[in-house]
C-alpha cells in the first residue's frame, strides 16, 4: 500500500506522460496533501462535505457534485453535496456579523450530523462563513499559495485537482493508499 504522497507523485507523473499538464501540482503537493488526506479520512469515516463557492466558481461546485457520484464508477456514493440556496442564505442573512451565520449553522447541524465545508473561490462573506465552521477545506484563492486568482489556467487547474481528489478517494476506499503523510 502506497502512502498518499507517493501515490500522488506517481499519478501526477503518469498524467504528465499522457499530456494532462498536472506537473504544477508536484511542487504544490505538500501544501495540498495534509488537507486532502484529512478530508478523505473524514468522508471515509462517514462524514459529509458541503461544497460552497463564490459566485464566479459556482459552476465548479456544480461540476463536483454532478461528477463525484456517477453510477458508472461502481462505488458507493459519497456524501458530497452542494445546497442550492445556501449561497443566497449566507449572502442575505449574514449582514456582516456572526448572528446570521449562527442561524444557518443551526439549520446545517440539524441536516448533517458530521459535516465539513469545502469552500472554493475568492475571499467573500461565504469564505468567512466557511472558515467560521472550523476545519473544512478552503481553496481561497487570495489567501493561499496553491491558487493564483489571475492565473489564466485556474479553471483547468481546479478540474485537475478535483479529478485527483476523486481518484484519491477511490484509492483510499479500496485500501490502495494510506492517508498517512
Image (cartoon, rainbow, N blue to C red):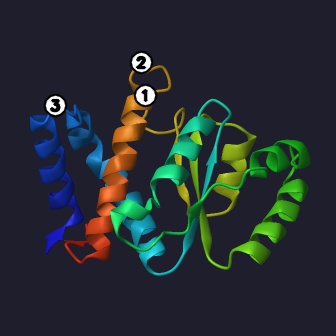
Cα gap from disc 2 to disc 3, whole angstroms: 18 Å
Q: Is residue 167 left or right of residue 114?
A: left
Q: Comparing marks 3 and 1, which lies closer to the viewer?
A: 3
Instruction: Report the number of numbered marks.
Output: 3
Q: Is residue 15 left or right of residue 169?
A: left
Q: Is residue 17 left or right of residue 35?
A: left
Q: Are marks 2 and 1 in contact (CB under 8 Å)?
A: yes
> Which sits earlier in the primary sequence, circle 3 or circle 1?
3
Q: Is residue 96 left or right of residue 41?
A: right
Tell me if I can see residue 146 in this picture.
no
Find numbered disc 2 in the image and state the secondary structure of the residue it sits on: loop
Find numbered disc 3 in the image and state the secondary structure of the residue it sits on: loop
Q: Residue tagged by mark 1? A: 154
* Circle number at residue 152: 2
Position of the C terminus, as image quadrant, is: bottom left
Q: x, y (%) of residue 104? A: 83, 61
Q: Is residue 128 above or below residue 117?
A: above
Residue density around tag 1, few if under 14, some if 14–19, many if 20 or more, within 10 Å? some
Q: Residue tagged by mark 3? A: 19
* Circle number at residue 119: none
Q: x, y (%) of residue 78? A: 49, 69
> Which sits earlier in the primary sequence, circle 2 or circle 3?
3
Residue density around tag 2, few if under 14, some if 14–19, many if 20 or more, within 10 Å? few
Find numbered disc 1 in the image and state the secondary structure of the residue it sits on: helix
Q: Is residue 163 above or below residue 41?
A: above
Residue drawn at point x = 27 percent, y = 48 percent: 29
Q: x, y (%) of residue 115? A: 62, 70
Q: Is residue 6 above or below residue 16?
A: below
Amino acid at each position: 500500500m502506497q502512502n498518499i504522497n507517493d501515490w500522488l507523485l506517481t499519478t501526477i507523473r503518469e498524467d504528465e506522460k499522457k499530456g494532462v499538464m498536472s506537473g504544477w501540482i508536484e511542487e504544490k503537493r505538500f501544501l495540498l496533501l495534509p488537507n486532502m488526506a484529512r478530508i478523505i479520512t473524514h468522508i471515509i469515516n462517514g462524514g459529509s462535505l458541503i461544497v460552497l463557492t463564490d459566485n464566479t466558481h459556482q459552476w465548479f461546485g456544480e461540476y463536483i457534485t454532478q461528477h463525484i457520484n456517477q453510477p458508472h464508477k461502481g462505488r458507493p456514493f459519497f456524501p458530497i453535496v452542494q445546497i442550492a440556496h445556501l449561497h443566497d442564505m449566507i449572502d442575505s442573512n449574514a449582514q456582516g456579523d456572526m448572528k446570521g451565520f449562527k442561524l444557518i449553522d443551526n439549520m446545517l447541524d440539524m441536516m448533517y450530523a458530521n459535516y465539513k465545508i469545502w469552500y472554493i473561490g475568492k475571499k467573500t462573506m461565504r469564505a468567512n462563513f466557511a472558515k467560521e465552521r472550523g476545519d473544512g477545506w478552503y481553496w481561497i484563492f487570495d489567501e493561499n499559495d496553491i491558487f493564483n486568482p489571475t492565473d489564466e489556467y485556474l479553471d483547468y487547474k481546479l478540474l485537475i485537482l478535483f479529478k485527483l481528489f476523486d481518484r484519491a478517494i477511490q484509492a483510499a476506499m479500496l485500501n490502495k493508499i494510506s492517508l498517512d503523510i
